[in-house]
Image (cartoon, rainbow, N blue to C red):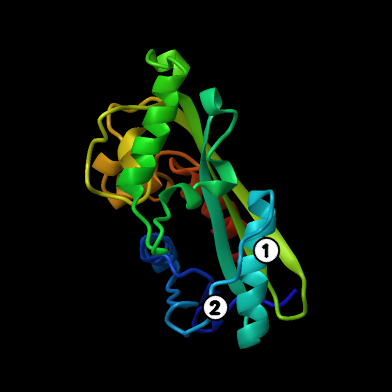
Amino acid sequence: MPGLDGSRLVIATHNKGKLAEFAELLAPFGITAKSAGDLGLPEPAETGSTFEANALTKASAAAQATALPALADDSGLCVDALGGAPGVHTADWATKPDGSRDFRMAMAKVEEALKARGASAPSQRRARFVAVLCLAWPDGTAEYYRGEVDGTLVWPPRGSRGFGYDPMFQPDGFDQTFGEMDASEKHGWEAGRGDLGLSHRARAFAKFARARLGA
């Protein structure tokens, strides 16, 4: 398998929040990369039933379109009391009729669903964030790196940092939500909090970095 050249890596996302996190995670390795959005690539339909399948869809589409290695993330919030929902449909819960996304609306949907099930105690509001990174190559080969973090859902949401459902997710062992943490706190592994890191994306990225970037 060829090595990675940071000037020749595509980040297969149109999500500005994810792109910002990738940029922060890649910076210590001297890698800058263009996103699928920057390159004007279309967003492929994510029809997979797993995070791995959807990550592969995005990464392989970008790799085939650019003839470059592409790194994609598929991630989501899995709530125990909701049978693992929204899961792979995490972004769909935020999608409005005009196609735009409103994660305040999505967080409210999660809260309404929890209330409908009488899930008010912290023990009834357990959830985890899952992230799967897929590194796809133009020849069709692919690699996967998975990270998870457990926590509790709080209401009302707290903090304006991060993106998505971050303001309602409080990771185990911390008093702050992801929405209240700065980037170094959320990524964790960069700040020396352990080999795997704190956030789901940081944990998946740490595995990728060890395998591909010599971390």
Q: Picture coordinates of residue 212 (x, y %)? A: 62, 65
Look at 71% across and 80% down and name the residue there.
138
Amino acid on which the number 1 mark rests in the picture = Leu
Quadrant in which the C terminus is drawn: bottom right
Q: Picture coordinates of residue 5 (x, y %)? A: 56, 80
Q: Eyeballing the image, is 134 above or below 9? A: above
The image quarter containing residue 26 is bottom left
Relative depth, front residue between 34 and 5: 34
Relative depth, front residue between 90 and 115: 115
Look at 54% across and 28% down and name the residue there.
82
Quadrant in which the N terminus is drawn: bottom right
Q: Could one spot residue 171 in this view of the protein?
A: no
Q: Picture coordinates of residue 15 (x, y %)? A: 42, 65
| Element type at mark 1 | helix
| Element type at mark 2 | loop
Q: Eyeballing the image, is 112 above or below 106? A: above
**Separation of residues labelled 2 and 1 (CA atoms):** 15 Å
Q: On the image, numbered disc 1 is attached to which residue?
A: 56
Q: Picture coordinates of residue 145 (x, y %)? A: 63, 53
- Sequence order check, earlier mark of 2 and 1: 2
Q: Eyeballing the image, is 120 above or below 8? A: above
The circle drawn on residue 9 is 2
How many numbered markers are drawn? 2
Q: Could one spot residue 153 in this view of the protein?
A: yes
Q: Eyeballing the image, is 142 above or below 174? A: below
Residue neighbourhood size for the residue with mark 2, other residues' Cα within 10 Å, grouped as few (<14), some (14–19), many (≥20): many
Look at 34% across and 37% down and name the residue there.
108
Mark closer to the observer (2, 1): 1
